[in-house]
Image: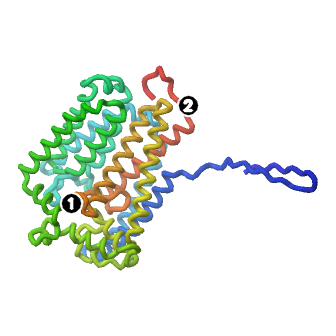
Amino acid sequence: MSMVLNRGRGAIRVKARANERPVNTLLLVLLLLLGTGLIMMTSASMEIANSLAGDPFYFFKRQVFFIGVALVVMLITLHINMNLWYRSSPLLLCLALVLLAAVLVPGLGTVVNGSARWIDLGFYRLQPSEMAKIFMVLYMAAYLQRHRDEVHERWSGFLKPMVILAAAITLLHFEPDHGAMVIMMLTTFTMLFLAGARLHRFVLIVMVCFAGVVALAIMKPYVINRLTSFLNPWAAEYVYGEGYQLTQALIAFGRGEWFGVGLGNSIQKLYFLPEAHTDFVLSIIAEEMGLLGVLLVMALFVALIWTALRLGRECEARGRLFEAYVAYGTGMLFATQVFINFGVNTGLLPTKGLTLPFLSYGGNSLLISCFMVAILMRIEFELRTQPDPDPAGGEP
């Protein structure tokens, strides 16, 4: 802070220039979410950790390790120019599709609870669907930067990315990972819409998707069971079956009331609520911290998503289209995943195994979520320090 001292008539006037660097919203929100997640995940997992590993802090130690690796990944990502992501986006998407196919190969893919979503590397269990979501965003952003006019004016520009999306969705269907399917579809559709695709062109795609959901429900009866149990989880035929997780989550919300029963005092985490430290950590937050705690967590996610969308709008206004679409897509990835997890925990959506970014236990989700925040921080850095591209030029 620079000060100018002006002496006159026996008085001293001090003038301060407010030229300090502003607080980085993305970094602040990230640290708050990581801290909140580590505390609440540990609280939710202590009983099951003690039962499985004989150490109540087993999951805490592993999550700290994942956070350390994620921070290293962030530091590396922050030093990579967005131009490199632009040029390598087709290769990254191909890598994601190959890995999605690899999990379906017997001996390569690891099956857990009937789903083949992981590749066991020995020291780490890789989940390709997490990578595929952000790599699809990078590819779509590069495509929309190159073909924005075609997407706006012709069917061909709209249908070409649909072919790529259909390939990824098909692979996810056979895992199956329907949560990742929905997130990838909604994010891609949003990016196309923001790039200027005509609204009526989505009608055909929506009809095809609806037909696909109906066919899926017919082919797989458990999908119908989940839908019907979601509508009335307290029914006698569902309360100890398909609707069990939802009823236990709702009990946790009811016990928490406004201000919660206190950190560590949850009863639902004592083997009543399955996956309390992963998919249903929000219910434990509601029980221990109350509705106020849930609203605070929601406010942090809203700040993160709003910042991503604001960055996208600012980049678009300055002609940085690739960065704009990456920011839009990243914001939508967070928005859809958070919305679905909140909806499942509160009974607004059918039960679906989907982690809450930064708060649920697990290395894959945490690494990719931190990677996405690092991408946003890099976009913000380049926006503040680099000149805008020539409007007549091609690449950013």
Q: Depth check: give the residue in front, 197 or 269.
A: 197
Would residue 55 be seen by someone viewing this image from the given angle? Answer: no
Is 36 located above or below residue 122 in the figure? below
What kind of residue is marked 2?
Pro
Q: Residue at x 41, y 49 (%)?
A: 305
Q: Which residue is mark 1?
A: 351
Horizontal and vertical percent position of residue 312:
44, 39
Horizontal and vertical percent position of residue 105:
14, 46
Is 311 located above or below residue 364 in the figure? above
Horizontal and vertical percent position of residue 155:
25, 25
Is the residue marked by circle 2 packed among few (<14), some (14-19), or many (20+) residues within 10 Å? few
Horizontal and vertical percent position of residue 227:
15, 57
Tag 1 secondary structure: loop
Q: Residue at x 26, y 57 (%)?
A: 354
**What's the distance in space between the residues labelled 1 and 2, CA to CA?**
47 Å
What kind of residue is marked 1?
Thr
Which of disc 2 and disc 1 is earlier in sequence?
Answer: 1
Q: Please indicate whether residue 18 sits to the left or right of residue 387 in the image.
A: right
- Residue 234's disc number: none
Residue found farthest to the right: 9
Quarter of the image for residue 59 reads: bottom left
Q: Depth check: give the residue in front, 366 or 178.
A: 178
Q: Which residue is mark 2?
A: 387
